[in-house]
Image: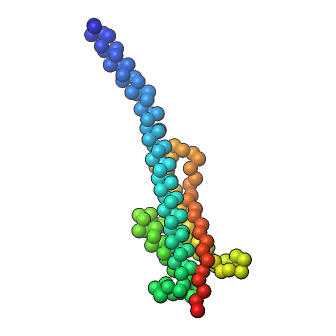
Amino acid sequence: MSPTVRKTRRGNAAIEFALLLPVVITLFGSIIDLSLYVTRAHVIQRVARDAARVGSATLESTTVHTGAGIKAAAIAEATTSLSTAGIACGAGCTVTAEWRTISGTKVIFVSVKYPFTAIMGIIPALPNQIRADFTMMTQEQS
């Protein structure tokens, strides 16, 4: 094999690498963005559920609250859970809790909205906000 043929093969490998590198980076970036979104959405849903549980469990001695205190306890639980999960509830993050009556039963409705910014921004279909709502029946105090 002549030296000219060997150099040509090395050049081909460099060209193939240069052509495939953007495709590989795009693929890995998309995987990272999608997995980050799914993980955050799962955490946000769990936080909404935990906040609704704290707000509805008014009979437990450690969480006895009345009236607006139940909403405040639910919001505090959501904020604490977000911080514990490593997701700070900063600008654009909102946590709301409100009383609702469904078929004559009092329920607490917790909504958590969290802004999401993709790292790579390759997948345009990913929403820029993660929202989780959770409704739980409240326990009546005796």
Is 101 located above or below residue 117 in the figure?
below
Question: Could you tell me if residue 94 is visible in this image?
Answer: no
From the top left corner, tell me how far across and down residue 42 is, in percent. Answer: 50, 60
In the image, farthest residue toward the top:
2
From the top left corner, tell me how far across and down residue 78 is, in percent. Answer: 50, 72
In the image, farthest residue toward the bottom:
142
Viewport quadrant of the C terminus: bottom right
Left or right: 40, with 133 as reference point:
left
Determine which quarter of the picture holds residue 8: top left
**Which residue does the image show at 38% across and 19% down from the upper left?**
12
Q: Nearer the viewer, residue 92 or 73?
A: 73
**Which residue does the image show at 47% across and 38% down from the upper left?**
26
Q: Nearer the viewer, residue 131 or 88?
A: 131
Left or right: 107, with 47 as reference point:
right
Viewport quadrant of the N terminus: top left
From the top left corner, tell me how far across and down residue 71 is, in percent. Answer: 56, 80
Left or right: 60, with 4 as reference point:
right
**Which residue does the image show at 47% across and 50% down from the upper left?**
35
From the top left corner, tell me how far across and down residue 51 is, in percent. Answer: 52, 73
Is 81 located above or below residue 5 in the figure?
below
